């Protein structure tokens, strides 16, 4: 708080120093000094005539011109033209002095981060660099999670990366922690089951099946869980049950679902070479017209 006060004081001082001249009234020209100059010039002409530097006609002409200027200076207004604008300049200076900080604060509050805490320099040095190799980034996240094991967001980010790297056992642990610290959800249960299947070499184990069933209990339309429950039925020799699960998925799926090709291929697989599975376009063509 003290630092903010110092910054505010410095800003106010800088603005005050810049705008202070605007608030000062202009100084009138020194009419008396101007008249004195003309008088000195008249005296100088008299001296030049006395020593013979200029002739009498030239001296008389110079006296007339200088006298004219002397009279003009004597009757000219003492206040400068800018004096009439002093009040306007002072008002402008006050508005700038008060208005600039208000505008700055009004812009900063919605766009800035006034409540963001300090980011220590040492922690900035350890911030992940997106150009680093993936293994190095994963190692940094793992080090962070060792010190902050309850960081659910960190586990949620790390788990799918571990799956892509083929570190399935560690991915299973990461998904368990993600569920523990982020809360239960059908998606997380399905992802956990998928990691268990990958760790088992593609076999839907009893543990994985339990996770998929939990996902379905949380969301009956969880596609990944439904697909792997069909795979479990297929692996157990219950191909008709697997086909029924996958047909149900295709019947409810939106046309642009990314997993439709994989489910159709699985349905062909359990149906044998004589199975006929309509494509999306063909299925749409045989739908009754409304």
Image: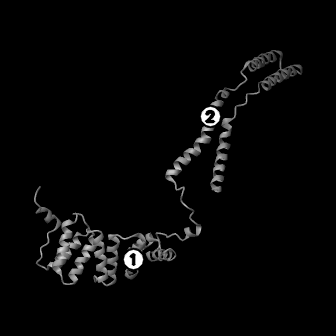
Residue 161 in view (yes/no): no
In depth, the one of 217 and 4 nearer the eye is 217
Q: CA distance from mark 2 to mark 1?
A: 66 Å
Earlier residue among tags 2 and 1: 2
Percent coordinates x, y for residue 278 in the rendering: 14, 69
Q: Residue at x 85, y 21 (%)?
A: 43
Q: Within 10 angstroms of label 2, few (less than 14), some, or many (20 or more) residues? A: few
Q: Nearer the viewer, mark 2 or mark 1?
A: 1
**Quarter of the figure with residue 91:** top right
The C terminus, quarter of image: bottom left
Q: Quadrant of the N terminus?
A: bottom right
**Drawn side of residue 270 relative to residue 208, left or right:** left
Q: Position of residue 226 (x, y in %)?
A: 25, 73
Q: Which residue is mark 1?
A: 176
Query: Which image quadrant is residue 159 in?
Result: bottom left
Residue 167 higher or lower than 71, as above or below: below
Q: In the drawing, what numbered circle is on residue 91?
A: 2
Residue 178, percent across and down?
41, 73
In the visual, does 268 lie left or right of 145? left
Q: At numbered mark 2, what does the secondary structure look like: helix, strand or loop? A: helix
């Amino acid at each position: 708080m003290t630092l903010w006060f110092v910054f505010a004081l410095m800003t106010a001082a800088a603005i005050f120093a810049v705008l202070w001249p605007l608030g000062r009234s202009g100084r009138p020209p020194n009419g008396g000094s101007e008249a004195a100059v003309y008088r000195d010039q008249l005296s100088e002409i008299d001296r030049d005539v006395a020593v013979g530097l200029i002739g009498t006609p030239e001296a008389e002409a110079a006296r007339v011109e200088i006298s004219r200027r002397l009279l003009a200076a004597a009757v000219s207004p003492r206040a400068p033209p800018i004096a009439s604008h002093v009040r306007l300049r002072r008002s402008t200076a006050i508005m700038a002095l008060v208005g600039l900080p208000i505008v700055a604060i009004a812009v900063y509050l919605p766009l800035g981060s006034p409540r963001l805490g300090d980011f220590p320099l040492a922690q900035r040095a350890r911030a992940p660099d997106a150009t680093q190799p993936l293994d190095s980034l994963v190692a940094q996240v793992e080090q962070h999670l060792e010190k902050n094991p309850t960081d659910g967001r960190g586990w949620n980010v790390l788990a799918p990366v571990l799956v892509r790297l083929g570190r399935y056992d560690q991915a299973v642990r990461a998904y368990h922690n993600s569920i523990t610290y982020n809360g239960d959800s059908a998606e997380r249960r399905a992802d956990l089951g998928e990691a268990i299947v990958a760790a088992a070499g593609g076999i839907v184990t009893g543990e994985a099946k339990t996770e998929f069933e939990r996902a379905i209990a949380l969301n009956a339309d969880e596609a990944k869980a439904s697909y792997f429950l069909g795979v479990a039925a297929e692996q157990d020799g219950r191909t008709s049950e697997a086909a029924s699960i996958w047909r149900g998925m295709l019947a409810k799926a939106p046309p642009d679902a990314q997993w439709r090709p994989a489910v159709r291929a699985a349905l062909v697989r359990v149906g044998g070479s004589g199975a006929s599975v309509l494509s999306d376009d063909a299925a749409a063509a045989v739908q009754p017209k409304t």
